[in-house]
Amino acid sequence: MSSTTRARRRLRPSRRRAVSPRQTLSALALSFSGGLLFVTSVPALAVTATAKQPVEDVYHPAPDEIVAAPQKVEVADDIEHAVIAPVSYDVEVAPPPVAAQVAGLGTVALGESRSVVWPVADPSRTSSGFGPRSAPCAGCSTYHDGVDFTPGNGTPVMSIADGVVQLATENGGGLGVNVEVVHNIGGQIYTTSYAHMQYGSLAVVAGQTVTAGQQLGVVGTTGQSTGPHLHLEMWAPDGVRFDGMAWLHDRLG
Ligand SMILES: [Zn+2]
């Protein structure tokens, strides 16, 4: 090759260079979009299909079968069993009820009262204690059979213990509006009487079961009374009336 030919070749523009950059970009863009069209229009699974494995089989593969083997837990022979201490507890047996004679009801099985309470909310206000006294009114006794609380007219009067009402009357004579309740207190039968309550205030009827603190009526001045007060009488198991104030103070402080 002569030097002249070499120089001519060097100067002759190549065919590739004849293609403009813009044409090259257009061709690339066309082939790229064509490739996209191919990729997006053919399902992916179909690509893996071969002649031996038709497309249909690829689309409908056999379902998996899961065989669950039974589980086993092996425990060493020398394992120690924990010994759980037995739970211990005490059982309190309720004392048996006591048969009591209740007026109008005959023999009644009375369960032991669960508590003893004052007959009024403020028992500190009293006027007349139990025992001999000078009669406060004409016809009043010189021996006071009960204790008088003076918490104020209309103050609720409550049963001092669980029990059964044996009398609830507005015609209690000198006792006015009066309620009597029979109780089993510590296995012994006691009777309490709540006198001089207001007319229309009776909250219980004869034969009714009441609980400690249950309202029976309100403080009044009915019957042989010189002013609003609660006259409380208490009968011991032997049927003899006693000083209820001292007895309640012993239990309630
Ligand atoms: Zn009295």
Image: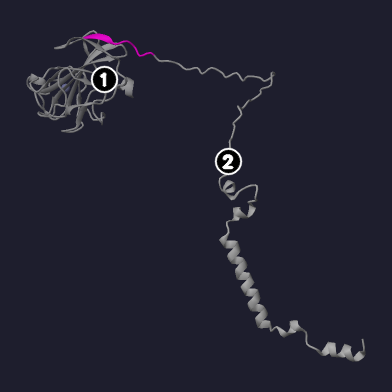
Q: Amino acid at mark 1?
A: Asp
Measuring from the top left, give residue 57's x and y in whole percent. Answer: 58, 46
Q: Is residue 14 left or right of residue 205?
A: right
Asked whether mark 2 lies closer than 8 Å to ligand 1, one says no
Q: Quadrant of ligand 1?
A: top left
Q: Residue 91 appears at what percent x and percent y?
A: 42, 15
Of the 4 image quadrants, the one containing the C terminus is top left
Give residue 96's position: percent from left, percent from top: 32, 10
What number is the disc on residue 175? none
In the image, taking residue 60 as reference, residue 213 lies left or right, namely left
Residue bounds of the magenta highlight: 93-100
Disc 2: CA contacts within 10 A as few (<14), some (14-19) or many (>=20): few
Between marks 1 and 2 in the image, the one whose residue lies nearer the viewer: 2
Q: Residues within 10 Å of mark 1 (few under 14, many from 20)?
A: many
Callout 1 touching callout 2 (CB < 8 Å)? no
Residue shown at 24%/13% (left/top)? 190
**Of the pair 199 and 19, the residue shown nearer to us:** 19
Q: Is residue 23 above or below residue 223?
A: below
- Viewer-side residue, 125 vs 10: 10
Q: In percent of the image, x 28 and y 24: which residue is there?
A: 117
Residue 63 or 196: which is nearer the viewer? 63
Residue 3, image quadrant:
bottom right
- Amino acid on which disc 2 is placed: Ala
Task: List the residue tagged with mark 1.
Answer: 162
Label 2: element kind: loop
Quarter occupied by residue 193? top left
Q: Secondary structure at mark 1?
A: loop
Q: Which mark is residue 62?
A: 2
| Up/down of 190 relative to 19, above or below | above
Q: Nearer the viewer, residue 52 or 67?
A: 52
